[in-house]
C-alpha cells in the first residue's frame, strides 16, 4: 500500500511539472491567448514635400489576439520624428492608431523608423516613414 501511494505521488508530481512546463512554454511562445498587433501598413512614403510642410501620418493597427494589447513603448530613430500612441490597453478586436510627425525643416531625402514594443505575440514591430523634403527656394 505504501509503495502504491508513493507511485501515485510521483505520477501526480510528474503530471504537475509537465503541465507547468507547457503553460510556461505557451506564455514564452506567445500561446494562443496572447494579444497580436496587426498593422494595415508598416511603411509610409510622403513623396516630395516642400520644406515646412505638415508631415503627419497615422499608422492604423488592430488587436487581433484574444487578450488586451498594451503598447509599452514607441520610439523613433531620431528626434526629428515624434510618435504619439494610445497609453490605454486595446481590447481584442479593437483598432487604434500611432500618429507619427516628421519635422520637415531639414532638406533632403529621409528614412526614419519607429519601433513599437508591446505585450503582443511578436513583441517588437518596426514602422518606417520616408520621403524627400525640397527647399522652398527651388523652382519647380
Image (tube, rainbow, N blue to C red):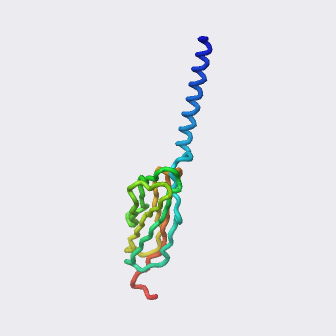
Q: Which quadrant is home to the N terminus?
A: top right
Q: Residue at x 47, y 70 (%)?
A: 110
Q: Nearer the viewer, residue 90 or 85?
A: 90
Q: Which image quadrant is residue 107 in?
A: bottom left
Q: Nearer the viewer, residue 132 or 53?
A: 53
Q: Residue furthest bottom?
A: 139
Above or below, 51 relative to 74: below
Point out residue 43 in the picture as x, y percentages from the top left corner. Answer: 52, 67
Instruction: Give the number of callouts.
Output: 0
Q: Which image quadrant is residue 26 in?
A: top right
Q: Residue at x 46, y 58 (%)?
A: 115
Point out residue 67 in the picture as x, y percentages from the top left corner. Answer: 49, 50
Point out residue 22 in the picture as x, y percentages from the top left corner. Answer: 57, 37
Above or below, 12 relative to 58: above
Q: Residue furthest front?
A: 1
Point out residue 70 in the picture as x, y percentages from the top left corner. Answer: 43, 52
Q: Residue at x 42, y 66 (%)?
A: 100
Amino acid at each position: 500500500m505504501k509503495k502504491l501511494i508513493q507511485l501515485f505521488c510521483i505520477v501526480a508530481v510528474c503530471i504537475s511539472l509537465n503541465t507547468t512546463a507547457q503553460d510556461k512554454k505557451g506564455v514564452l511562445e506567445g500561446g494562443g491567448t496572447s494579444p497580436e498587433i496587426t498593422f494595415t501598413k508598416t511603411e509610409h512614403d510622403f513623396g516630395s514635400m516642400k520644406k515646412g510642410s505638415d508631415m503627419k501620418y497615422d499608422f492604423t493597427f488592430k488587436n487581433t489576439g484574444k487578450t488586451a494589447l498594451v503598447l509599452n513603448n514607441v520610439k523613433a530613430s531620431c528626434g526629428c520624428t515624434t510618435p504619439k500612441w494610445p497609453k490605454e490597453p486595446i481590447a481584442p478586436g479593437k483598432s487604434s492608431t500611432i500618429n507619427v510627425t516628421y519635422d520637415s525643416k531639414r532638406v533632403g531625402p529621409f528614412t526614419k523608423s519607429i519601433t513599437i514594443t508591446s505585450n503582443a505575440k511578436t513583441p517588437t514591430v518596426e514602422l518606417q516613414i520616408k520621403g524627400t523634403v525640397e527647399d522652398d527656394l527651388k523652382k519647380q
